[in-house]
Image (cartoon, grey):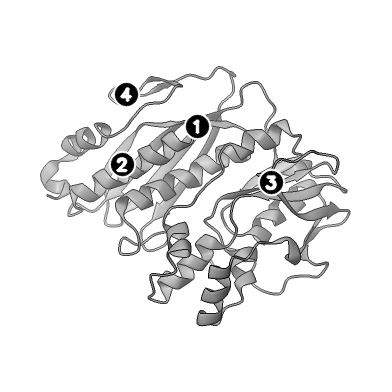
Amino acid sequence: MTVAKTGEFGLIARITARLGTGPGVLLGPGDDAALVAAPDARVLASTDVLVEGRHFRRDWASGTEIGRRAAAANLADIAAMGGYPTALLVALCCPPDLDVAWAEELADGLAAEAALAGAAVVGGDISASPVLTIAVTALGDLRGTKPVLRGGARPGDVVAVAGRLGYAGAGLTILSRGFRSPKLLVDAYRHPEVHYAAGPQANQLGATAMLDISDGLLADLGHIATASGVAIDVQRAALDVPAAMVDAAKALGVDPYSWVLAGGDDHALAATFPPYADLTDDWHVIGRVSHGGGVTVDGRRYMGQKGWDHFR
C-alpha cells in the first residue's frame, strides 16, 4: 500500500501508533504541539536533514536502519553538548508512491534509537515531495550543568574520543563499490553505535570542549581548533584500525587511515580534557592541544581529504 492510498492522516496514525514515550514527555503526538519537561529551564536544540541520494540510499539500508541513522545524527549533538536527549521532532517529506511499510519501518528506527538515548519521538510533520527527505530536531536537558562548547580547549589539554572512528566511512566505500561485506563495517554505516552517555560523562570529568564526529575526525577537530584558537595534533599510533578495516582497505586499494581520519557518520564524541583529568575507559586519548592553529597528524599537515563537505 502506498502513502497516497493511505492518506496523510492515515499515515500519521500508523506512525504515531509505533512511537513510544520517554520520561520527559508530558504530552506526545496528537495535539498542535507536544509538551516536553525542561527541569533545567534551558533546552538544548539541534536539527539535521537527510536527503535520499545525498545522505542515504534505500537499496543500501532498511527503513529501520535509516531511521536509526537519522535519529543518531541529532541525538549525538545533544550528547556532545554534555546534555541528555529528551525528545525528537521529525518531518517526513516523501513521494506519494512510497510504500507505507517503509514509512512504518522508518518510525520504528527513529523510536528505537531515541529510546536508546533516553528520549522519544514527540511529533513532527508529513508532506508530499518528489525527493524523500527526513528532517529531525532533537531536544535535550543539561540537568543543571554547564554546556560543553567547542571554544574551551586550552594548550596542554589532551584530545580523546569515545566511540568508533572510520567504521561508517569504510562501510560507505564498500557499499559504493558494490559490495556488502565485511558486515562489521557495512552495519556501522547502516546504524552507527553512539556512546550517548559519554557526553554527560565528559561534562562531569571536566571536558573543556566537545563535539560529535559527523563529517570526519580532522574536519570536526578543526572546528574545535578554530573556535578555541588553538592547535591540535593527532597521533596516528593512538588510532584504532581493526583487522577488518585493514583487510577491506587492502582489497579496495584504500589507505585505512583515510577512513579513520576523514570518514564521517560514526558519531563518535571527541573532547578535550585538562591533562590531569581522570578519564574513564570510554575515552581514548588520541592527541594533544597546543598553542597555534589548525589540526595536524604526527606534527605534520595532513594532505588528504579531511572530511565531508555537503557542497564539495
| In the image, residue 41 above or below residue 49 | above
SS class of the residue under badge 2? helix
- Residue named by callout 2: 107
- Residue named by callout 4: 32
For marks 4 and 1, the one nearer the N-term is 4
Label disc, if present, on residue 283 of the rendered structure: 3
Comparing 111 with 164, the one in front is: 164
For marks 4 and 2, the one nearer the N-term is 4
- Residue named by callout 1: 139
Q: CA distance from mark 4 to mark 2?
A: 20 Å
Image position, residue 189 (x, y; %): 46, 59
The mark closer to the camera, 1 or 2, is 2
Quarter of the rendering containing residue 232: bottom right
Tag 4: Cα neighbours inside 10 Å, few (<14), some, or many (≥20)?
few
On screen, residue 2 versus residue 86, left or right, reads left
| In the image, residue 24 above or below residue 14 | above
For marks 1 and 2, the one nearer the N-term is 2
Q: Please state which amino acid type lies under the numbered disc 3.
A: Trp
Comparing 235 with 226, the one in front is: 235
The mark closer to the camera, 3 or 1, is 3
Image position, residue 268 (x, y; %): 59, 50
Q: Please state which amino acid type lies under the numbered disc 1.
A: Leu
Tag 2: Cα neighbours inside 10 Å, few (<14), some, or many (≥20)?
many
